[in-house]
Image: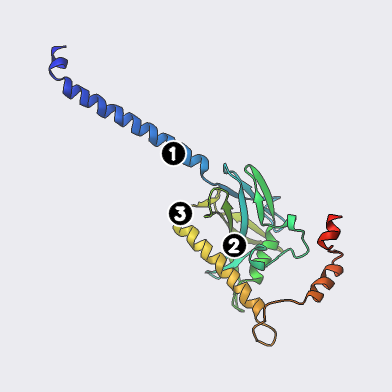
Amino acid sequence: MEWLVDHNQVVSIAVQIVTAFVWLVYLQLLLQNFRRERRSKLLLTRVAGGHERGHLMLGNMGAEPIFVKALLADLVVDGKTYHSIASDSGGFAPFGDSQPDESIKGPLNTAEYRDLGRISDLVDVALEFSSLPDDAKEMETVVFTVLAESSRDNILVAGRLSLDVYNAGEHQRFLPQSLSTEQLRSFRKRRELASRLEEMLEQEARAYLTGEDGKRRGRGAELGQLRLKQRGDGRQTKAPHEAAE
């Protein structure tokens, strides 16, 4: 007791240091738990088998809703990687006759899933919009990357699944390289993916703005043509006063 009385200042400082250390550990655990709860987690997986009739499924296992924006595809052909897109984002619509609610794009709540389509169809779309050389022979791997936007902020969230392609006679099999989906959370990766999406939009603009004669199309469409298109689709528009009645 005499030692404690004689060294009370030292003991007090030591207790304060230990208390501060405990609080720092406690705050660190709270911060990690908070970040884990708000962290996005996208899951990509095969369903209905690994053959060409199998489908690619997307699940949102994060704590917040997301808005799916695009499905990118990287094709490894003859040892080289070619970038492409496998969704209706950027104006490239693999399912042209689909209704809007059947699109790959759209909101996805937490703990919900969405069928992104048949794997072979997604590969066909990616091949159509890729810049493969005419002498390309063999596809080795296809990498699907889903891009979404979180409701928390405007930054992209992304998940990636790599599938090796094997020939089984007249059929193809798509086998994943890993059991889990790679989560792309780094700022650099998300910046690269956002740049790729912008590049796709620019390619779409260049394709549509260039006419068959090679000249740039002018902006605007004739109202008569738009009305004829609506009537041809079986849709009729009403004037505001008619809709109010």
* Residue located beneath label 1 in the image: 32
Of discs 3 and 2, which sits in the foreground? 3
Which amino acid does the dot numbered 1 rest on? Gln
Q: Secondary structure at mark 3?
A: loop
Image quarter (top left, top right, bottom left or bottom right) of the C terminus: bottom right
x 51%, y 45%: residue: 39
Tell which of 92 and 84 is nearer to you: 92
In the image: residue 191, left or right of residue 139: left
Quarter of the figure with residue 131: bottom right
Q: Is 85 in front, or is 118? A: 85
Q: In the rendered image, which residue does mark 2 sit on?
A: 72
For image coordinates 77% across by 60% down, the residue present is: 98
Residue type indicated by callout 3: Ser
State the separation of the CA atoms marked 1 and 2.
31 Å
Looking at the rendered structure, which numbered label has been put on residue 155?
A: none
* Sequence-first tag of 1 and 2: 1
Nearer to the camera, 157 or 139: 157
Residue 40 visible in the snapshot: yes
Q: Position of residue 77 (x, y in %)?
A: 57, 69
Tell me the crowding category of disc 2: few under 14, some 14 to 19, or many 20 or more residues within 10 angstroms, Cα based.
many
Task: Work out which residue is located at the far top of the displayed protein and give it.
Answer: 1
Quarter holding the N terminus is top left
Q: Which residue is mark 3?
A: 186
